[in-house]
Image (tube, rainbow, N blue to C red):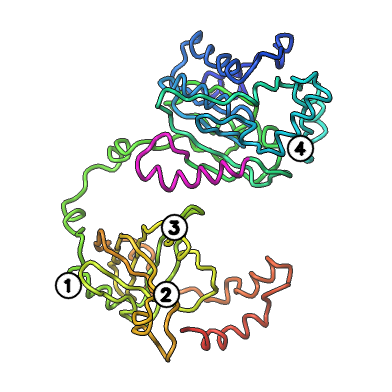
Amino acid sequence: MRPLFRGAGHEFFSPTYTGLGERAHLARPEVDLSTHVQDVAAVFEVEDLKDVTLLGHSYGGMVATGVADKAAGRIARVVYLDAFAPKDGQSLFDLLGPKGEAHMRAGAAKDGDGWKLPLNPMPPDTSPEDSAWAVPKRRPQPIKTFKEKIKLTSGKFPPRHYIYAKKAGPGDVFRQFAERAKSENENDFAKERPEAFRLLRLFQKSQTVHFDAAPRSCIAARTTHVSCVIEIGGFTMPDTIAPRIVTSVAELEALYGQLAEAATVKEVARITPHYRAYIEASPFCALATSGPGGLDCSPRGDKPGFVRVHNEKTLMLPDRRGNNRIDSLRNIVRDPRVALLFLIPGVGNTLRVNGRAHLSVEPALLASFEIDGKPPRSVMVMQVDAIYFQCARALVRSELWDPAQHVDPKSLPSAGQILAALSHDRVGGASYDRDWPGRAAKTLW
């Protein structure tokens, strides 16, 4: 990695922890997480490094977190690749869980003189060549590096990005951090909290992430404002990282320039008569929701006006029959923030509505939405916070309403074909497609 990064104009450092690698002779029971954090932080001081991209894999995420706390002003970003990402007061044992901790402690007691942790086996898809290179170089870590709880005191943290290898091995310990990154990306970034995670990539190539990505993919990190890269934990960056990213609202606004007056005047906090006309003419909208499990965007459609304007601040959307996944409804119960995007066939302008919602099962309200004697199971009641039209550029560019651009459904895989392929023919197939029109006609409401 070093010649590749330097060939692209970057400095590259890969500090060795006390007690490992060429510093194995310094191993002793007293070595802990703080020792390794200081090992890396010292490189920043001695080399006077600034604008650093800090890379951490596995245990290296613990160290990267500690270093970023100590040297936040010198770091442009922290990138975790299948790495432990602790919060203040957590140890690696805390993140492993009781079973993992018990296994490691038992191994140290049996084969490590009580203080040296056993080496985990190499991932099963490691090539023979990589194993031959890596195995002789591996050394046991002192158990205190796993026991010590990290202390974060600065209150500052550079932007963090998490890369998760979806092709995980048994006992996947890193999914928890990918889920946390996903959640923080959706929630805390919306509040402009730079310390929150951004889930950059779900990397599905191999369990052996520190060997499997092609070394030349590291050149993807070239950019004029990254002057230095420090790697800890030993991995190769996947070629899908795009390091030239926007990291602040100020940078984003400078990139796009000032808003036109029309873009701000059109937004109001109530349903005006003009906007009401759009809602009552629309037979289709997309419902966007957010929850602990992630974002969801779901289609909703019925006869024009199916979304009821109750008053200038309230919309009501009945939930008609579907497949009972209820992803959107689960999100609303946990997080009331919702958004609607209304489309009207033949009309270029769309209508966007943002607000907060709850689910009502009030019998009288459900009855008021009955069709063919069938009420919805629930009604989403939405309080409008913002409403405005979106100009027609997207629909003009896409030619969405032009019949000449319509796609022949037979040119794409059918629902039955997709289900059969994904289930190895347990469900779906030709009979699913053949029966669907009749099934749908009986279950529309």
Q: In what quadrant of the picture does the N terminus appear?
A: top right
Q: Amino acid at mark 3?
A: Arg
* Image spot of residue 393 (x, y percent): 30, 61
Mark 1 and mark 4 residues within 8 Å of each other at the beta carbon? no
Q: Which residue is mark 4?
A: 123
Q: Identify the residue shown where x is 26% and y is 63%.
A: 384
Q: Are marks 4 and 2 in contact (CB under 8 Å)?
A: no
Picture residue at 68% right of the left edge, 38% below the top = 98
Question: Which numbered mark, 2 or 1, is in the foreground of this view?
Answer: 2
- Asked if residue 120 is positioned above or below residue 27 in the image, the reply reads below
Against 357, is 27 above or below? above
* Label annotation for residue 334: 3
Q: Residue at x 17, y 72 (%)?
A: 273
Instruction: Please tell me which of labels 3 and 4 falls first in the chain.
Output: 4
Amino acid carrying mark 4 in the image:
Pro
| Residue corresponding to mark 2 | 378
Q: Answer yes or no: do the residues labelled 2 and 1 have beta carbons within 8 Å?
A: no
Q: Nearer the viewer, mark 4 or mark 2?
A: 2
The residue under label 1 is 273
- Distance CA(mark 2)–CA(mark 1): 27 Å
| First in sequence: mark 2 vs mark 1 | 1
- The numbered mark, 1 or 4, whose residue comes first in the sequence reads 4
